[in-house]
Image: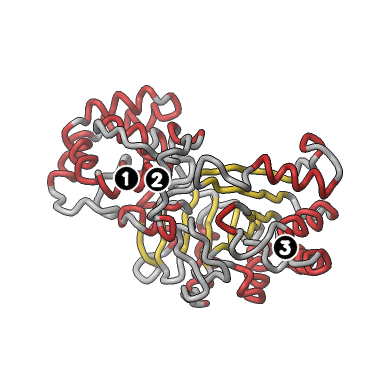
Amino acid sequence: MKPQTVSVFLDYKCNFSCGHCSVGSSPEAKFKMDDSYLDQVFEQVQSMPSVEVIVFTGGEVTLHWETLLEGIARAKELGYMTRIVTNSWWAHDIERARDGLEELLDAGLDEISTSYDDFHTDFTDPEPILNLIEAGMETDRLKNLSVATVIGHEDPEYDKARMEELLSERFDCPPEEFDDRLVLIEDKASPLGHGAQLDVSDLEPADTLLAGCKDVINTVSVHPDGSVKACCGHAQWYVPDLTLGSLDEETLPEIVDRSGQNLVYWLIHKLGPKQLLEELGVDNHHSGICHACHDLLGNHREEFLEYIREETDDVRTMLIQNGSFKTDAQAIVEKREEIMDALEDTDDVGPGALPKIVS
């Protein structure tokens, strides 16, 4: 479990204030990353050979256009794949979409992630998204463009099927003839951040809910205050255990190395929060894996840690049954006494105190 992606939050500010935003972004949420933290990322990530991709996100990352272009260029110069996450507001007409995309590509951009759904309709129509897609498909320099629709209730106006219709009209072709570089994604809202009051009880859970979390530690995020978090998902702002450390106290490689040996993260990565909740006897409805992770590390944290302390044999069995985890499970078996001692000696079992799998 080593990071392949580092996600950099340049700011929490956004020109939209969408009702499902787990970041809680808005025009008033001004929290820009200091240049010193960005410099640390570029200097220190080179000591992490597993990293392949640098993502620039927010907030709305394109509100800092020059900083973004410079960041993309620096990442590309170091040999990384580059991606931005944007609401595409800047592609308000096709010429601006082409010009803006050309600037980004000239800087070294490889991939774009954007989104449109019912939560965006108060701030824009789908036109900027369609403009960006058209501009992106006109050039072979953009390697990938993903468009997500987030579903917040059982009868949305804008879902994946609706986006396919709009694109079919725009390009005069059926979905099966879309460019392979264009990826359409449908996800489910998590009741966190702006969306804390969302009722997701009528939503069919996301397909990934019952799986392990592929993002935890494999994608680490660096935030405007210099904090480093264990993923890029919705729960990271709301449960302390997903904060790995701070660039003010340790280097990024030190934080990641320590956290990559953490038993709790391994359990979430390999088994997934939903299975772990079921082991605790919790049968709540969850819209997706981030919703379940927030429930596990927020509402049921103490039960979960107590379960690890008392049911080590069950934990071992579950991990051994996960075929890709046999080697690490054996390490846990061999270090059972060390793990138990670490847990018993810890009053506040936070991310820095949880037991290592290997030393």
Q: Which residue is mark 1?
A: 295
Q: Where does the image place residue 263, in percent across and percent down from the top left?
A: 31, 41
Identity of the residue drawn at 63% across and 63% down: 75
Residue type, mark 3 in image: Gly
Figure quadrant of residue 284: top left
Front disc: 1 or 3: 1
How many C-alpha atoms fall within 10 Å of the one at disc 3: few (<14), some, or many (≥20)? many
Q: Are marks 2 and 1 in contact (CB under 8 Å)?
A: yes
Residue topped by disc 3: 108
Residue 248 appears in which quarter of the rendering?
A: bottom left
Q: Which residue is mark 2?
A: 291
Q: Tell me: residue 118, above or below residue 311.
A: below
The amino acid sitting under disc 1 is Asp
SS under mark 1:
helix
Q: Secondary structure at mark 2?
A: helix
Q: Nearer the viewer, residue 154 or 236?
A: 154
